[in-house]
Structure formats: C-alpha cells, structure tokens
Amino acid sequence: MTEGKLAGKVAIVTGAGNGLGAHCATVLAEHGARVAVVDIRLDAAQEVAAAIEARGGTAMAVETDVSAEDDIRRMVAAVVDQWGRIDVLHNNAAALDLKTRYADRDVCNVEIEAWDRSMDVNARGAMLCCKHAIPVMLRNGGGSVIHSSSGFGVMGDATLTSYACSKAALLALSRMVAAQYGKQGVRSNALVIGFVLNEHAQKEVPDEIKQILLAQHLTPELGSPRQIADVVAFLASDESAFVTGHTMMVDGGFTSHAPSLVPIRELFARKGDNKW
Ligand SMILES: NC(=O)c1ccc[n+]([C@@H]2O[C@H](COP(=O)([O-])OP(=O)(O)OC[C@H]3O[C@@H](n4cnc5c(N)ncnc54)[C@H](O)[C@@H]3O)[C@@H](O)[C@H]2O)c1
C-alpha cells in the first residue's frame, strides 16, 4: 500500500470520521498519501485512522471543529509537525446532522441557527482550511485543493436552503483559490456530487425517495462512496496537473438533463415508442 500515485504526498481530509470523507481518506492512503483524518468527533477520526494503519497506510486523527479558526491553526500545525508538508486539502466536512437538516427548510421557514451552522461549517470552515493550509502548500511548491459541493449548490430545490447556499459558496471559493494561487502551483477544483448511498443514506433514506432520485440520475445506480473517492484521488494526484478552476459534475448526470426527461421517458414507455 505504500506505492501509488500519491506516494510522498500529505493529505488533509476534513469530516473524515464518517461517510464520504472516511472513504476518501482511505482511498488516498491506499494510493500512498499520508492522511490527516480530521473531524469534530475524535473517536470517529481515530477509528478511521486506525483502520487505515491496520491496512498498511499512514494516518493521524486530528480533532477539529472546522468552523473554529484556532482549531484549524492547531490542526495544520499538528500535520506540519508530523509530516512537514501539505500537498492536498479536501474540504469535505459539512453540518449534516439531523437537527441542522430538519431546521434548514424553505426560505420563509428556515431557522437562523441552521443557516449560521451551515455557513459556519460548510463555507467558512472550507475557507479557513484554505487560509491556513495554502501557505504551507506554497512553501512546498504547490498542492491540490478539492471542495465537496453538491447538486444543491447549482439547482433550486424545495428545502435545505442554507445547505444549498453554503455549497454554492464553495464553487466560488474554489475558483478564487485557483485564480489567486495557480501561478504558484496550487490547483483548486470543486465536485458537484450527486446522491451517494453512504451508510446513513442506505439506512435512513426511505426507498420511495431513493427511487425518485434514481430516476433523475442517468446511471443505472445511485452513487457509491468509492466513486467519489476515486475522483478525489485523481484530483489529488499529478494525473490532473492541468485541471484547475474546474467544477466537476460527479453526479451520474443528475444536473445534465432536461427536467422533462423522466416524464417523457415514462410517456414513451406507456406508448411503446418514441415518435412525436
Ligand atoms: N452523501 C451524499 O449523497 C452527498 C451528496 C452531495 C454532496 N455531499 C457532500 O459530501 C460531503 C460528505 O457528505 P457525507 O454524506 O459523507 O456526510 P456525513 O454527515 O456522513 O459526514 C460529514 C462529516 O463531517 C463531520 N463534521 C460535521 N461538522 C464538522 C465540523 N464542524 N468540523 C469538522 N468535522 C465536522 C461529521 O462529524 C462527519 O464525520 C459533504 O460536504 C456533503 O455536502 C454528499
């Protein structure tokens, strides 16, 4: 596991104690990166770091609330103390706990705490991680920043107003980083992620909702954490050296088709042909 396209690189993955972040940290380590598993929940981060080490990888767990600048200063210092450099920053952490999600509704009914928490963690946290990790990248000649955004960041929807606005902010942040530090070797790209069946979604999302979402993806299945992690590993590696300032749809085509596609497909199925 020490050989691979990320050998010699040091990566920070925020929100890596669970879900997609845990998978991304694991896959980056499989490709040879030394990975800082950063999460507000130390026990979860330690579990993921231990699992990476048990498989022959190199990882450290760092307890960090990404909305707190002092925490981020400490986290970046701990990574530099341990490994001396930072090559990859994956801004993955998001406030997706049930309390925040339930309070994050349509604009007229959004609870301001949900707005503040979403902005603090998802947008401000990502900016603060950039603010403190990029100077280290600049010292070692560059790096790659990857931001996990969402379909909510580019399309209107019925609820999750604050989440959507925070995810749209990441798209701008990504381009700002690419524009400001590209000449010094720092690349920055954002992922618009579709519906991925992580552990929580497998268990908690009702089948009816999964079927509605699946119909709107152009792929036979909804996404898997591994499919996201493979794209993150590509963007983290020198294979993507000419890719920067890019917003990449990693969403099974969720955002790339006409809204009429699904009802038209059903109509054609009922008619038995696709003649207008
Ligand atoms: N799962 C999907 O279908 C999907 C779709 C689109 C985008 N995304 C994005 O992918 C990323 C990961 O999503 P997920 O489904 O794995 O979420 P998740 O809720 O399973 O994991 C989020 C992680 O972030 C951590 N976290 C929360 N607040 C934090 C804070 N203040 N500081 C540090 N860590 C904190 C949590 O403890 C958790 O480990 C998110 O940015 C999300 O917006 C996911």
Image (tube, rainbow, N blue to C red):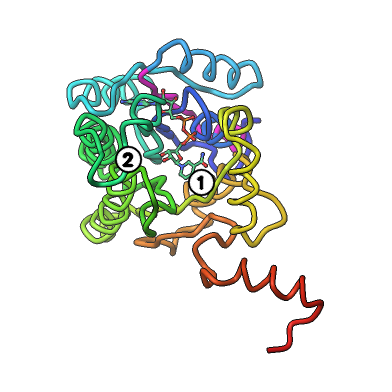
Is 268 left or right of 72, judged from the image as shown? right
Q: In which quarter of the image is residue 251?
A: bottom right
User: Residue 194's x, y, as percent?
Assistant: 52, 51
Is 108 left or right of 54, judged from the image as shown? left
Query: Relative to the observer, which residue lies in front, 27 or 84?
Result: 27
Q: Is residue 31 magenta?
A: yes
Q: Which residue lies furthest to the right in this view?
A: 272
Observer-side mark, 2 or 1, equals 2
Confirm or reject: label 1 Cβ below 8 Å from ligand 1: no
Q: In which quarter of the image is residue 80?
A: top left
User: Residue 65's x, y, as percent?
Assistant: 29, 22
Is 116 left or right of 3, judged from the image as shown? left
Numbered label attached to residue 105:
2
Q: In this view, does 33 lie above or below 270?
A: above
Q: Mark 1: which amino acid?
A: Val
Q: In which quarter of the image is residue 105?
A: top left
Cα–Cα gap, marks 2 and 1? 30 Å
Identified at 28% across, 59% down, the residue is: 175
Numbered label attached to residue 232:
1
Identified at 62% across, 27% down, the residue is: 203
Identified at 59% across, 18% down, the residue is: 53
In the rendered image, the quadrant that contains the C terminus is: bottom right
User: Residue 141's x, y, as percent?
Assistant: 31, 47
Query: Relative to the observer, which residue lies in front, 27 or 92?
Result: 92
Find the magenta span and give its range.
Answer: 29-40
Helix or strand or loop: what does disc 2 sit on? loop
User: Residue 173's x, y, as percent?
Assistant: 26, 52
Label 2 neighbour load within 10 Å: few <14, some 14-19, many 20+: some
Query: Relative to the observer, which residue lies in front, 268 or 80?
Result: 268
Helix or strand or loop: what does disc 1 sit on? helix
